[in-house]
Structures are given as C-alpha cells and as structure tokens.
Image (cartoon, rainbow, N blue to C red):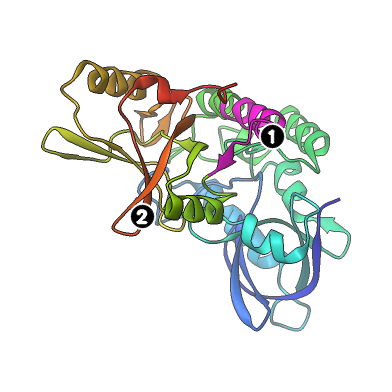
Amino acid sequence: MGTRIENLQVIKVADGDTISVRLSNKNESLRLVCVDTEEKSGSPKLPHTKAGQLATDMARLYFSAVGGGLVKVDLEFDTDDAEEVCLVKHRDNFGRLLCYVHKTTDNFNLKLIQEGWSPYFTKYGRSRVYQQEFTEAEASAQAGNLIIWNPMTNSGGGARNYTALIPWWGLRDSIVQDYRLLGPAANVISVRLDYQKILKASETGATLTILCDLQDGITRRVGDAALIKAGSDVHRFNLWLPDTTTDDGIAIINLIQKRYIASKQGVEDIGGRGYAYVTGRIEQHRGIPQIVLDNHNQITDFPPV
C-alpha cells in the first residue's frame, strides 16, 4: 500500500483520468497514474475519440454526489514515502500529482482498466502497488471486448494504435524497472524524481549520472550547436551539444536520432527507447541546469559502473 491522503473534496472532473481536489487549502490537479483514457478534445498529439468522451461522461457521473455536487475521495501514491516527500516526488511534467484515487472501497484507476476505459499505461513505469491487479484487469477487459478494445466504440472516428503502443510502453517500463533496481546503488538520479538534487549539484559543478527522456530529440539548433530539452516545463534540464559538425558531435546526433527519439505514426509519437543515462558535469545556463555533451559515451542505456 502507498501513502494515502484521505477525505479530499473533488472540485472538478476534467476528463476520464484527470480530476482536481482541494488539498491543503489549495486546488490540486490529479493525474491518475498507470491509466490513460482517450482524448475527448484539446490534444494536438493524441487522436480525439468517442471513447474519450464516453470516459469523461462516465467519470463525471462517477464522482457526482447524491443530491448534487461532487464526492470526497482518498488519494494514494505509488510509494510509502512520507506525505511531504510524496507531494514533491509524485508530480508529472505539468506539475500534477500522480496518484491512485479511491472512492469508498473502489479503486478508480482499477475500474478504468477493468471496464475497458483505459489500457494499463506503463509508458512511465509500471505500478509498484497494483501490478498484478492492473495486468489481470486489462486482460479481462480485452477478453470481454470492452470499450477501447471493441473496434465498434470508435467506429468512424479517431482511434489509438494499441498494437504498436503497448510494446513500446513495455520497453520503456523495462528501462524504468532497471532504474528502480540499479539506480540507487549506482548513485543515479532522475530528472523528475530528484530535481532538487540536480539544482543543488548545478551550483557546485558536481558530476552526476541522470536518467532523462530524450524521446523528443534535438529541440533547437543554434548555428553548429544543438539544444536537447531533457526535462520539462516543471523540471527544466537541458543537454547542450556545442558542435554538431565534429566526429563526436555527429556521433551524438546519430545516437539520439536512431536509438532514443520517438517517430510519428499517425497522430502519435511511437518508438525509440526515450530514456537514457547521461553523465557529465552539471552547470547552469541562464538559471537552467545542463550537461555539455562532447562524447557519445556520455549517453548510455545502463548506469556506468
């Protein structure tokens, strides 16, 4: 069981996998972890589907209270760290809290998978708490041809290519599992989970190995140099390649593009390992931590021994 915060008032249901609650006298957006309901609107990177609208309608009804308004829920994090640690550690690239949501005895994340509203979403790592339950729930929904697993649900409209997505998510999950197993012993840190450590290291110029996600590839070119955004708007972290024309620079570009970057298939980006371990001296440029790349051996699939 993960750390729980109980009896929180739901104040908004955005869609099937995102709600807002009142927590510590402020509104917090919750992104339900290990699920990914389809989009009803508003996403340039994902197809809009009928199943996405149905999931939103179902969630709004599910969280409605008898007599009007919205219900209260408990949230559960994917680790048993202290509450104050969880509130920092378990946030996505948009600052939303990543968690499971419980209404009375119901696990809503499990309900989404079990009833076919969502696949078991492991793109950012499997559930530490509910791995078996979620795996079995997805298999049951597939066997029953429920919602997203039934082609008729999205007939005539947008659809997601789960045949391609699920193996890619599985690859990324295996990398996260390696990190969970090997990272602490190798003194490796994560951009999202250990961002404060990165900021502190950038003040002293320490050398670190950092797990980051390179699936977006080269973000910007500045003359012969290149910038790779390896963090997010919340966890800002860059890789800087000062010269893409040298043998080392060309090798780094080749490695990122051929091994880590995701490729577009239809609307969505699919494929590429994404995750990489990057080793180097942390410095700051305009207040943003960065590592300068001068050798492709700085980028590896496993933490250096």
- Residue at (71, 42) in percent of width and height: 113
Residue 275 visible in rendering: no
Report how far apart the C-alphas of labels 2 and 1 lie in the structure.
Answer: 26 Å
Q: Secondary structure at mark 2?
A: strand
Q: Which residues are magenta?
A: 172-190
129 horizontally vs 109: left or right: right
Give the residue number, with chain letter if any, for mark 1.
180
Q: Please tell me how crowded label 2 is: few (under 14), some (14-19), or many (20+) other residues with Cα within 10 Å.
A: some
Using a 10 Å C-alpha cutoff, classify the residue at mark 1 as few (fewer than 14 neighbours), some (14 to 19) or many (20 or more): few
User: Which of the pair 19/290 is nearer the observer?
Assistant: 290
Q: Residue beneath label 2, please? A: 288
How many marks the image carries: the answer is: 2
Taking depth in this image into account, of 267 and 129 the one nearest to the observer is: 129
- Helix, strand or loop for disc 1: helix
- Viewer-nearest residue: 242 or 110: 242
Q: Earlier in the sequence, mark 2 or mark 1?
A: 1
Residue found 58% across the figure and 54% down from its top: 54
Q: Quadrant of residue 108?
A: bottom right
In reply to whether residue 188 is colored magenta, the answer given is: yes
Query: Please, is residue 116 above or below residue 25 in the view?
Result: above
Would residue 185 be seen by someone viewing this image from the given angle?
yes
* Coordinates of residue 133 in the picture (x, y in percent): 82, 38
Q: Residue type at mark 1: give it.
A: Arg
